[in-house]
Image (tube, rainbow, N blue to C red):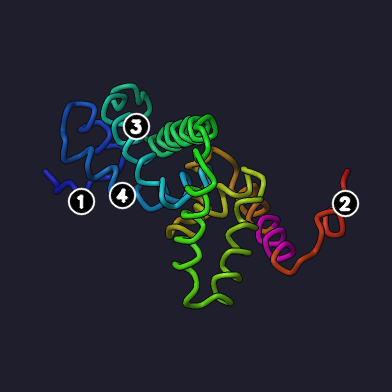
Amino acid sequence: MATIEGQNEPALVCAARDGDKDALQELLARNWAWLRGLVYSIIGDADEIDDVLQDVCVRVITKIDSVRQPERFRPWLAVLARHQALRHRQRRAQRPGPLSGELAESECDQKAAQFSEDLERTEQLDRILQAVRSLPEKYREVFMLQYSSDLTYRQIAEILDIPVTTVQIRLVRGRAMIRDQVAGKEKNEVYPSG
C-alpha cells in the first residue's frame, strides 16, 4: 500500500470516510492554504481566520461521510468552508459594539501603535487590503485563492465549480478593480453602470 502522502485525493477521501484519521488529516493539510484564502475572502479579518478554520475542521470530521463523489472533494470542501465563513460573518455582525468610548479609544490606540513603525507602507497595504475587501465576493474569492496559495486556474475552477475561463475573467477584472481603487479612480469612472 502506498503512503498517505502518495495517495490521490479521491483515495484519501474514501479512506477518511472509512475512519482513517491520517487520511483526513492529510486531506486538510493539502487544502489548508487555499482554505485560508477562501475564508479570508469572506470574513476579511485575518485575526478570525483560525476560528473559522477550526469550525471547518469540525464540520469536515463530522460530515466527511456525506461526500458521495470523492473526486469532487474540493468543491464540497469549498461549499462547507464558505458556509462556515458566512455564518461567522453573520454572527460577528450581530455582536454588540464596544460598551464605552474608552474601549473603542483604547483599541484604536493599540492599533495605531502597531502600525506606527512604517506608516507609509502600512497605508499602502491598507489601501490594497481595502480594495481587496471591497471586491464583489465572486472576484474576491478567486483573487484570494490565486494569491494565498499556489493553485492553478484549473484547481480554482474545480474548487469553485466554475469554468476555467470564468476564473481567468474574474482575476483580470478583480485585479483591474483593485488597481483602480488603489490609484484612486472612482468606480463609475472605470466601470460604467449597465
Q: Residue at x 54, y 46 (%)?
A: 101
Q: Nearer the viewer, mark 4 or mark 1?
A: 4
Residue at the disc numbered 4 = 30
Q: Earlier in the sequence, mark 4 or mark 1?
A: 1
Query: What is the magenta segment's predominant secondary structure?
Result: helix
SS of the residue at dot 1? helix
First reached walking from the N terminus: tag 4 or tag 2: 4
- Say which label, 4 or 3, has the lower sequence index: 4
* Left or right placement of residue 173 versus residue 161 in this view: right
Query: Nearer the N terminus, badge 1 or badge 2?
Result: 1
Q: Was residue 179 drawn as part of the magenta stretch in this picture?
A: yes
**Mark 4 to mark 3: distance in Å?**
15 Å
Residue 157 spot, x, y in % from top left: 53, 45
Q: Which residue is mark 3?
A: 70
Q: Position of residue 30 (x, y in %)?
A: 31, 49
Badge 3 amino acid: Pro
**Gap between marks 4 and 2, in whole Å?**
41 Å
* Image: magenta residue range: 173-181
Query: Cα distance, mark 3 to mark 1?
Result: 17 Å
The residue shown at (39%, 39%) is 52
Label 2, secondary structure: give it.
Answer: loop
